[in-house]
């Protein structure tokens, strides 16, 4: 019994210690990524900053840096200086961030961001549908033009054959007229 109690105590200390070591390592790693992201922001490299904040949001959600990484990651993702803004990612981050306890002014700003990002996302989906529709229409038009070109070629061939047949028919008529005249000349007048 005493052996079980000592083993249980040892294991609990071991696991508690390890958990603290892992948490502090996670916190250190998250802090490094947050600092890199901040340096990217200072250099106006918002695309790289958004990626660094994304590392924190994906890998270090149990750290104290997670909440700030969501907010700053969303803003970096949609910054006008970001050459490849990602509005759906920003919307996702803002939704997660809005679940935290925020002071009034920040809550108001997040509400506006959420509304604007949802509108942008909706407009982008409509634009994507319109683009898809235009692409389909262009493909239909290209197919129709090809069909028209093929039909024109066939029509040209049929016209050539028709002309050839008309020439043969005219020759046959000429031969028939000639034969008819020859028969009439060969008949005695009667």
Image (cartoon, rainbow, N blue to C red):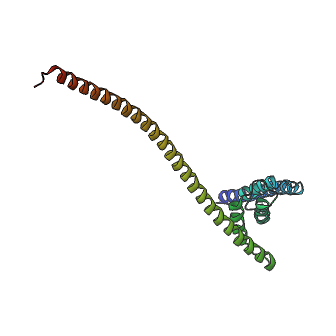
Q: Which residue occupies the foreground of this view, 1 or 42? A: 42
From the viewer's perspective, tell me whether residue 137 is left or right of residue 53: left
Pick out the residue farthest to the front: 189
Pick out the residue farthest to the top: 186
Check the image and report above or below for 62 versus 166. below
Measuring from the top left, give residue 178's x and y in whole percent. 25, 24
Position of the N terminus, as image quadrant, is bottom right
Residue at the spot 59% in from the left edge and 59% down from the top edge: 130
Pick out the residue farthest to the bottom: 104
Residue 115 lies in quadrant: bottom right
Check the image and report above or below for 131 versus 93. above
Residue at the spot 76% in from the left edge and 59% down from the top edge: 77
Pick out the residue farthest to the left: 190
Measuring from the top left, give residue 167's x and y in whole percent. 35, 29
From the viewer's perspective, tell me whether residue 134 is left or right of residue 35: left
Q: Which residue occupies the foreground of this view, 25 or 74? A: 74
Can I make out residue 50 in this image?
A: yes
């Amino acid at each position: 019994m005493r052996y079980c109690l000592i083993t249980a105590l040892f294991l609990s200390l071991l696991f508690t210690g390890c958990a603290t070591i892992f948490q502090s390592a996670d916190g250190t790693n998250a802090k490094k990524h947050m600092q890199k992201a901040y340096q990217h922001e200072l250099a106006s490299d918002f695309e790289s900053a958004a990626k660094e904040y994304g590392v924190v949001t994906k890998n270090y959600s149990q750290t104290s840096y997670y909440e700030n990484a969501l907010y700053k990651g969303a803003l970096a993702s949609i910054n006008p200086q970001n050459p490849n803004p990602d509005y759906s990612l920003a919307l996702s981050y803002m939704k997660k961030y809005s679940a935290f306890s925020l002071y009034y002014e920040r809550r108001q700003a997040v509400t506006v961001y959420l509304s604007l990002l949802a509108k942008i996302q909706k407009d982008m989906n409509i634009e994507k549908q319109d683009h898809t529709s235009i692409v389909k229409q262009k493909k239909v038009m290209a197919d129709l033009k090809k069909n028209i070109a093929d039909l024109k070629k066939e029509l040209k061939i049929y016209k050539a054959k028709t002309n050839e047949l008309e020439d043969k028919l005219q020759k046959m008529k000429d031969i028939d007229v000639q034969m008819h005249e020859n028969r009439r000349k060969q008949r005695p007048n009667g």
